[in-house]
Image (tube, coloured by chain):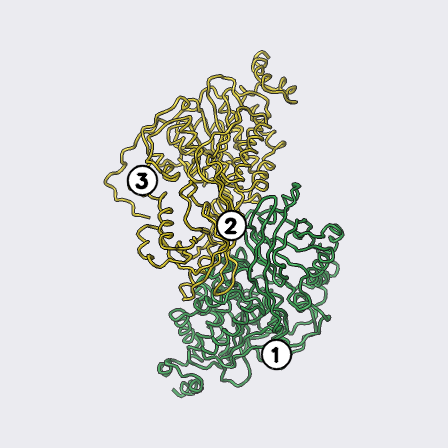
Chain colours: A green, B yellow
Amino acid sequence: MHRLLLSIAPVALVVASPAWAQERTSPDIRDDQRAAVARIIDEGTSQSQVMPIVQHMTDVIGPRLTNSPQMRQAEDWAEQKFREMGLTNVRREGFEFGRGWSIERSSVRMLAPRPLQLTAIPIAWTPATDGTLSAPIVVAPMSDPDHFARWRGQLRGKIVLISQPGTGEDQTDPLFHRLTGEELSALDRYQEPVNDPEQRRRSATRGTFEAERLAFLAAEGAVAFVRMSYRDGKQLHGEGYLHQAGRTAPIPGVELAAEDYRRLTRLAASGTVPTLEITSDVRFDDTNTQAYNILADIAGSSGTGEYVMAGAHYDSWVAGDGATDNAAGSAVVMEAARIIRALGVRPRRTIRFTLWNGEEQGLFGSINYIDRHLASRPAGPAGETGLQRYLAEATRFPVTPKPGFRDLAAYFNIDNGSGRIRGIHAEGNVQAMPTLSEWLSPFRAMGATEVAIARTGGTDHQLMAAIGLPAFQFIQDPLEYDTLTHHSGSDTFDHLRAADLRQGAVVLAGLLWQAANADAPLPRSPLPRQPVVTDPFATPTPED
Amino acid sequence: MHRLLLSIAPVALVVASPAWAQERTSPDIRDDQRAAVARIIDEGTSQSQVMPIVQHMTDVIGPRLTNSPQMRQAEDWAEQKFREMGLTNVRREGFEFGRGWSIERSSVRMLAPRPLQLTAIPIAWTPATDGTLSAPIVVAPMSDPDHFARWRGQLRGKIVLISQPGTGEDQTDPLFHRLTGEELSALDRYQEPVNDPEQRRRSATRGTFEAERLAFLAAEGAVAFVRMSYRDGKQLHGEGYLHQAGRTAPIPGVELAAEDYRRLTRLAASGTVPTLEITSDVRFDDTNTQAYNILADIAGSSGTGEYVMAGAHYDSWVAGDGATDNAAGSAVVMEAARIIRALGVRPRRTIRFTLWNGEEQGLFGSINYIDRHLASRPAGPAGETGLQRYLAEATRFPVTPKPGFRDLAAYFNIDNGSGRIRGIHAEGNVQAMPTLSEWLSPFRAMGATEVAIARTGGTDHQLMAAIGLPAFQFIQDPLEYDTLTHHSGSDTFDHLRAADLRQGAVVLAGLLWQAANADAPLPRSPLPRQPVVTDPFATPTPED
């Protein structure tokens, strides 16, 4: 009784909820992890708010391209929502990103040899057409600066098709898939870290080729460019990376559905050069070039400064509504905050909920968080792009921890769509695996069973794990994430699965709670150092 | 030697080809079926023209909606092509169909609560918008006249969403599939013919509801209607059936991608009624309301009037280029003609190649062929729609054979996409099965192995088989036919498979040749009669 009174005393300072009366009779859930989990499961199932949250993000706000008007609305809404939930220290942390951009209206038609409305989307951060633009096409695939010579002098006044058309593939795997037990177990496979200087060199040029090709097109007098969708079946994506002021593409660009693109190339090859009509009514907004991470806390009682954190990137591309990528993860993070807040008990360590921004263009938000709070690394060359920085980040040594480095006791990232949590990637941290396994154990019957050693990348835990922090990404059922929805026009609310998202919020809340109240923080990997070249006499991997 | 000279004598009358010299030394392929098949395989593989033929139909001509300008171009091209191949009696047979219709330009946008370009297509034979039309939506699903009362007085000035939105489904089957041996064998299963008067009654009303609903919408002052795509993943189709002059929809109508449609209904349900902007620039052409089947012969030597026939419908919907449905089958029929013509030998029976028209709206072309050449049946009520006639046709007795009834020795229909031929449906004709099996035997190693008893429907052999003619539909690997391409915007050349189409043309040519030169025509089913009600005291099947 004494302990109970002590433990709930701090709660009285921050909570004034109807749940208060029943607090007094429950066990001390700070010390009884299973009791807390029981309440988390109840709150996250019978009182779930994850679907209304994700519906607001997707249907009402819509796609959330970093710095777009819709992302500004999303930033405000998330802060307000965290405050309504009673979280504290709700704030935004800004960083330089670039221009706002949004689509007002777009249309691409074939005018000749026959009228045909094509399936197309403007590429992010490309400029508008001045009204409507019509021109013949030229098929001039360029994926390397070596290809420019082949097309010099042939592009003036043309709409240039820059992709290799290829042919369709037999889609023999189901679009929708849940992991089998066998597939789950196969994830727990150790992979030696690779240090391949040649691969690093190639990566470093990847971030600049897009701008080089555009400069070539503009210099040659091309009037617009068209690239092909990388998915068949009329899917569109529209990713673009020239978001900084001063780096905007010099000519308009659109992505065409693969079927439509290939038809154009076949017609051109048969000697009938098609003429296209492009209308791309897109808008830039340069009123504020800062993007913002949104952070909110449930304050801990320990006073040590230690915290555990959950994060998901909130930004998206614009072809769909960014539902599975990553309103899903964002809503799971917010719902986990709501569930834990509803416990009405202060955790030992602070629990932080973070919605990252600028993830899609190179983990801008989480890199900024690292720079600001966690560690410093040698700077890259001036004028480095987001993609270049991201690709170089894991190889810039030494890592110099900041004072906040020790405070982050665990970070959980969620960014693999709407599928339920089936386990967690330990991201090479072998010491943490038994504890992660123990924390997952209450959720085995919900399908969350696997702790896999593998390192994963491409999202916001990656560069935290790369500097030795206990940062983890969940294993989720893929559903249609890789096959259909990721970045595509089909990334809408209907492709979310409610039961999966409820499970995700429950598991995330459960792990956060247990991590926040654990006696000791999670063990950490050794501080990473510049690796030696693993196999200096190996045959270099061929250029891809 | 004597026989050989005799057998090639008629050929000299019709063939003057460089192949002539080698004719004199080949075995008499009219009597040696395997020798003919060997030459058919060689011609259909090493000299195949099926891909250039199908590319012209799809990329160059494009979709071939019955009576559209593109179908007129396609009719001329097919006749010319058959003549170039040296076929005789190349002709068109016309029948009353209705209006020409084509899309010049279209766009559907959400204006409020946020600007969004939606994925949409005008519904076939709906009228154009007068420029651009903007209005708020109302979600008023109506699938039965009983539903009209619910929405009376609420539709004036509105864009009416007429479909039930439902939710997305887990697509756990692969898009692309080839039949396993087990699946093939399972097709050989006898099904007793059903005679359910209740089902007949329901079918008879199906053809009229679309017009009834449109009359209701117009009377209530709705400005346009929107229906939802029946496939997820941004697929569009655009089928419409009001092609006769005087039956055109009174207001414009569009089909929206399921993702876009459902978003509108969720927004409306959340209290934010979206406003849409619709531009549907479509064109009618009433200069000729007749549609045409295209027919061409390789004349037989027997002089009996007997013929064997291959057919495929040439018309398509307009969301894609009608590639797998059914430029594929049409090209296989034309290529089979070319292959057989290249043998340089006159068959015993005439071989007829037919491209049907108006199939998609109710088998208009093949019904006209039956009426004109094969049999008569009691007339339906005046003003009967194509769909009503189609649905009633199999139940109108007695069947009165015309003189041409006995002449048709075999009909092979191909209309299941681009997949290779895996066998043939005997369509209930048990007597024909051993012969069909024998004719298929040279193609076992190409995957064509199965003769299955089942009756199949929905395409042009159906009503020939229904009056007791030896009319058969091939079994084909489905590839993506049912899952993706059938009627959709993804029905383009890239979704065809060249090796499959070559195999299809070879197998079809092989069957035609063997059927044309067989000693006896195929056995026929008994002349069908009005069935008695199979099970008069059974529980009626519930309304669907």
Q: Amino acid at mark 1?
A: His
Q: For mark 3, does the 10 Å Cα neighbourhood hold few (<14), some (14 to 19), or many (20 or more) residues? A: few
* Left or right: where B86 falls relative to B130: right
The mark lying in front, picked from 1 and 3, is 3
- Residues at discs 1 and 2 in contact (Cβ within 8 Å): no
- Going from N to C along the chain, the mark reached first, 2 or 3, is 3
User: Residues under labels 1 and 3: Cα distance?
Assistant: 74 Å
Q: Amino acid at mark 3?
A: Arg
Q: For mark 2, does the 10 Å Cα neighbourhood hold few (<14), some (14 to 19), or many (20 or more) residues? A: some
The mark lying in front, picked from 2 and 3, is 2
- Residue matched to label 2: B281
Against A510, residue A237 (above or below) is above
Q: For mark 1, does the 10 Å Cα neighbourhood hold few (<14), some (14 to 19), or many (20 or more) residues? A: some
Q: Amino acid at mark 2?
A: Asp
The percent coordinates of residue A465 (x first, y second) are 60, 70
Which of these two is toward me, A241 or A306? A241
Residue visible at 63% across and 32% down in the picture: B46
* Left or right: where B359 falls relative to B530: right
- Residue matched to label 1: A373
